Image (cartoon, helix red, strand yellow):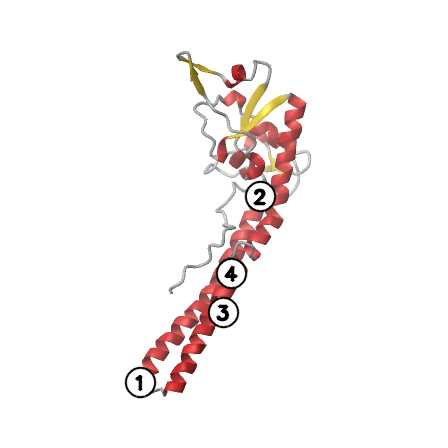
Amino acid sequence: MKAFRILILTAALVCGGILTANAQLGGGQKIVYVDSEYIMENIPEYGDAQAELNALSEKWQKEVKAVYDKVSEMYSKYQTDMLLLSEDQKRAREQAIIDKEQEAKNLQQQYFGPEGQLYQKRTELIQPIQEKVYTAMKDLAQTKGYAFIFDLASGTSVLYASEKNDVSDDVLDQLGNVMQTVRREDRRRAGATSASPTSGSSSSNSKASSSSGGSKASNKGGGPKTKK
């Protein structure tokens, strides 16, 4: 999630002691962090989007697998009939197998390629949510006077992070002004019990489509593996 990779926090060991990032920046600038995975897990719309992507991925994988299964069936039958076929018939059957295998590869690329339908659908569903989250973080930073917001979920190496500097819930509250989020008191980390969604930090009568992210469909191709 490039939108959340704002800066990289480094710890330095100087004169036998660890300097805090605040001291490194002159003492007046506020530094906080978020956990973008936690934020996304507490946005019902994100869970719904992941469920839709997973359903599409499974459906398309079955379609691709069906074509590859047909290739295997054609090849097995060709091997069985080979001794009874003329050279022309062999060439025709071999070409039919090659064509069917190419059809399977094309379908796999169409669905799971770098610019395939799954990638396009993921961009359509997920990118608007990411943009809203980024906007909420930016607005919060401007309101609270934060100089930097780091994302612990981005792979940044952080030796220590105090929970009091975690503003993930504040971002979710800010985000609740423009879209449905889980109420602060009901939010859970990954693997915990699902919670009830709300708009902002107060209760909402909107449809509870709670989710904690669900399994994630990949946007990097990832169709079924096939024999070569």
Q: Is residue 189 left or right of residue 88?
A: right
**Does residue 33 show up?**
yes
Sequence-first disc among 1 and 2: 2
Mark 2 element type: helix
Q: Is disc 2 surrounded by few (<14), some (14 to 19) or many (20+) residues within 10 Å?
A: many
Q: What residue type is labelled 2?
A: Tyr
Callout 1–callout 2 Cβ contact below 8 Å: no
Gap between marks 1 and 2 measured at Cα: 57 Å
The residue wearing badge 4 is 109
Gap between marks 4 and 1 measured at Cα: 35 Å
Mark 1 element type: helix
Residue beneath the point at 52% across and 50% down: 219
Rendered position, 103 above or below 171? below
Q: Which amino acid does label 3 sit on?
A: Glu
Numbered label attached to residue 46: 2
The residue wearing badge 3 is 103
Rendering quarter of residue 142: top right
Gap between marks 2 and 4 measured at Cα: 26 Å
Q: Is disc 1 surrounded by few (<14), some (14 to 19) or many (20+) residues within 10 Å?
A: few
Numbered label attached to residue 83: 1
Q: Is residue 188 left or right of residue 29?
A: left
